Image (tube, rainbow, N blue to C red):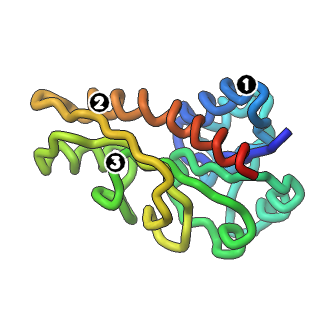
Amino acid sequence: MKQIVIFASGSGSTFEYLVQHAADVYSVAGMFCDRAHAGVISRARRLNVPYYIVDNRNKWQKSLDQLQPDLIVLAGYLKLLPHNIISRFQVINTHPALLPSYGGKGFYGDRVHQAVLHAGETVSGVTIHRVDREYDRGEILVQQSVPVHPDDTVIRLAGRVQAVEKPLLFETIKQLLEAQ
């Protein structure tokens, strides 16, 4: 069975979705997090997924090398991965907007939705893309749009985007692993 690892920095709702939907498609070999007190860690414990803290000592890179995942998925992970990781592994990311708009350093989570609303956009969405050496600049694999309603708040827009994001990410993972 193919193995993935997931990198996350926040509460871990996408991480949990991917673990719960893994079934016969893949197994989640581990979760890597750059914040020792992030909510995703308690989810990893509850779901019995080994977790690793990404720090400056690079011990985590040895753990990643030992796992040898078929795919690395960034699910709310906010840091750039080192070049030696993205050059050796297939890495994808999910972004809560239609790239190239509203992407790049500092554009994540509610900041993206706030920018979309502030600009008066009528459409937002989700982008799944390959990871390269810059924030949100890798090859776009798939996008799905979501309407922006005139009375939207950040919370309502985020909810609509997340409802599309998780299944789209799962399907993209499935397709990439089947193509290997």
Give the distance between the C-alpha atoms of the residues marked 2 and 1, in whole angstroms: 26 Å
| Foreground disc of the pair 1, 3 | 3
| Foreground disc of the pair 3, 2 | 3
Residue 97, label in figure: 3
Give the distance between the C-alpha atoms of the residues marked 3 and 2, in whole angstroms: 14 Å
Residue at left offset 76%, top offset 38%: 28
Residue 76, label in figure: none
Contact (Cβ within 8 Å) of mark 2 with mark 1: no
| Foreground disc of the pair 2, 1 | 2
Residue 154 x %, y %? 25, 35
Residue at left offset 79%, top offset 36%: 27
Residue 80 x %, y %? 55, 66
Residue 146 x %, y %? 29, 35
Specify the amino acid type for callout 3.
Ala
Residue at left offset 68%, top offset 60%: 90
Residue 155, label in figure: 2
Which badge, 3 or 2, is on the more N-terminal residue?
3
Question: As drawn, is 175 to the left or to the right of 168?
Answer: right
Specify the amino acid type for callout 1.
Arg
Q: Is residue 131 above or below residue 113?
A: below
Q: Residue 54's quadrant in the figure?
A: bottom right
Q: Secondary structure at mark 1?
A: helix
Residue under label 1, please give it. 46
Q: Secondary structure at mark 3?
A: loop
Specify the amino acid type for callout 2.
Ile
Which badge, 1 or 3, is on the more N-terminal residue?
1
